[in-house]
Amino acid sequence: MNSCVISLSSNAEAGKNISLAKALLSERFSDISFSSQIETSPFGSGYKANFQNLAARFSCSESEEEINFLLKQMETRLGRTPEFKAQKIVPVDLDIILWNQSVVRDDYYRFPFLLELINQLR
C-alpha cells in the first residue's frame, strides 16, 4: 500500500471548488484525511485572487503515475482548463507532494504554509 499526501488549492469560487474536490477525493479514497484550510496571497504575479489551500493524506494501491493522472482528471472535471491557467485562474489544483514519505514536488519547500498543513496530518 502506498501513502500519498497532496495539496489542494483554488483561487476561483474557492469554497465551492474545494468542497467539490474534497467530495470527489473522499468518494475515491475511504481513509482520506484533510488538514485545516487556510487563505494565502498568490506566489507570483497576475493572479486574480487569493488562494484557499489545504492538504490531504490517503493510502492507495495505485502507482504514483496513476494517482497523478486521476488528480489531473479531477482538475479537468472541476473546470481547470489551459485558458484559465493562462489567465491565472485556478478552479482547483491537486498535486502530489509526498509519495511514501518522499518529497516529489518542490512546492513542499517553496510554500511555507504547505509544511504547516502537512504537519497537521501527522
Image (cartoon, rainbow, N blue to C red):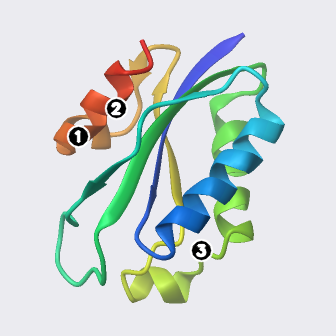
- Disc 3 residue type? Arg
Instruction: Between residue 22 and residue 47, name the one nearer to us.
Output: 22
Instruction: Report x, y in % for residue 4.
Output: 57, 25
Element carrying mark 1: helix
Evaluate whether residue 72 shows in this view.
no
Tell me: residue 26, above or below residue 3.
below
Q: Which dot marks residue 80? A: 3
Which residue in the structure is indicated by mark 1? 113
Rendered image quadrant of residue 11: bottom left
Label 3 with label 2: CB-CB less than 8 Å:
no
Label 1 with label 2: CB-CB less than 8 Å:
yes
Element carrying mark 3: loop
Q: Which of label 3 and label 2 is nearer to you?
A: 2
Label 1 with label 3: CB-CB less than 8 Å:
no
Q: CA separation, marks 3 and 2?
A: 23 Å
Element carrying mark 2: helix
Q: How many marks?
A: 3
Q: Few, some or many C-alpha atoms within 10 Å of disc 3 (few <14, some 14-19, many ≥20)? A: some
- Residue at the location (21% across, 36% down)? 109
Rendered image quadrant of residue 17: bottom right
Q: Few, some or many C-alpha atoms within 10 Å of disc 2 (few <14, some 14-19, many ≥20)? A: many
Quarter in which the N terminus is drawn: top right
Instruction: Report x, y in % for residue 8.
Output: 49, 49
- Disc 2 residue type? Leu
Q: Which dot marks residue 117? A: 2
Q: CA separation, marks 1 and 3?
A: 23 Å
